[in-house]
Amino acid sequence: MNYFSFSPVELEALRLSLWVSFWALFISLPPGIIIAWILARMEFPGKSILNGMIHLPLVLPPVVIGYLLLVVMGRKGLIGSILYEYLGFSVAFTWKGAALASAVMAFPLLVRAIKLSIDNVDPGLENAARTLGAGPMRVFFTITLPLMIPGIITGMILAFARSLGEFGATITFVSNIQGETQTLPLALYTLMQVPNGETGAMRLCLISILIAMAALVCSQRLEKRFPGYVKG
């Protein structure tokens, strides 16, 4: 068996997985930073409910998340129908939908890593900057954000790796369309169902393991280098 000769389908799945994971991270990073800051620095009624909703993808079956996305963002969904009717835009059964599903599933890991980093930022530094006349935005961008960087990087690594491995929500929301939504896990699943697909499935399995291990090693090295910021 040749484990180093990739078929066009396998290469396309790998390329699409990287592309989808990049966009999943891109669309989730800004709201992830904002929500992490809100959870770490603000007190308000319903905070525990917001925190629970953010972490729901960690405990719900991914198929449930995919079905909810279909109900909300499908062409006949609550929001998706409006987008399709007035803008001619639809994310269901497209790579954009795969990116959205991956972003939702990886979002809790991103938020948690960033929030832990904010929790370890000394509020005294922020208060000192305010007493010197710095406004809230200036305090955030000159004090808080630079000190959050290790947690942000850790969250990005974990979220990217989680996006690469997303299966249940993706196949439920956007199906398994070769060249459009067939990411690495979906291609592996497909190869397992066809005759003589074991070699290709093993190649994709090994790639998935290598990517996941690389992400974990990077995360652990960051924890050792910045223990005060990325550990709770």
Image (cartoon, grey):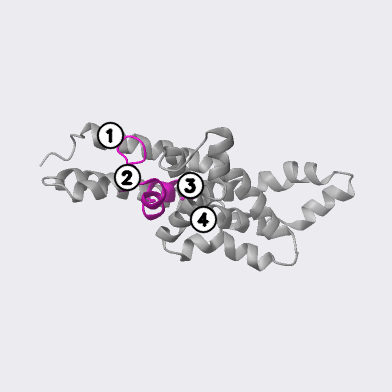
| Picture residue at 20% right of the left edge, 34% below the top | 7
Q: Amino acid at mark 2?
A: Asn
Q: Which mark is residue 74?
A: 3
| Picture residue at 10% right of the left edge, 42% below the top | 1
Q: Earlier in the sequence, mark 4 or mark 1?
A: 1
| Picture residue at 49% right of the left edge, 43% below the top | 24
Q: Is residue 148 visible?
A: no
Q: Amino acid at mark 4?
A: Leu
How crowded pointer 3 is (Cα within 10 Å; few <14, some 14-19, many 20+) is rated as many
Q: Which mark is residue 109?
A: 4
Disc 2 is placed on an element classified as: loop
Q: Nearer the viewer, residue 114 or 39?
A: 39
| Magenta stretch: includes residue 164 | yes
Q: Earlier in the sequence, mark 4 or mark 3?
A: 3
State yes or no: discs 1 and 3 in contact (Cβ < 8 Å). no
Q: Measured from the top left, where is residue 140 in percent x and y? A: 74, 46
Which quarter of the figure is the C terminus placed in?
Answer: bottom right
- 135 horizontally vs 161: left or right: right
Q: Is residue 186 depicted above or below 179 in this figure?
A: below
Q: Amino acid at mark 1?
A: Leu
- Disc number lying in front (1 or 2): 2
Q: Earlier in the sequence, mark 2 or mark 4?
A: 4
Residue range highlighted in magenta = 157-185
Q: Is residue 207 depicted above or below 123 in this figure?
A: above
Q: Which mark is residue 11?
A: 1
- Disc number lying in front (4 or 1): 1
Q: Amino acid at mark 3?
A: Gly
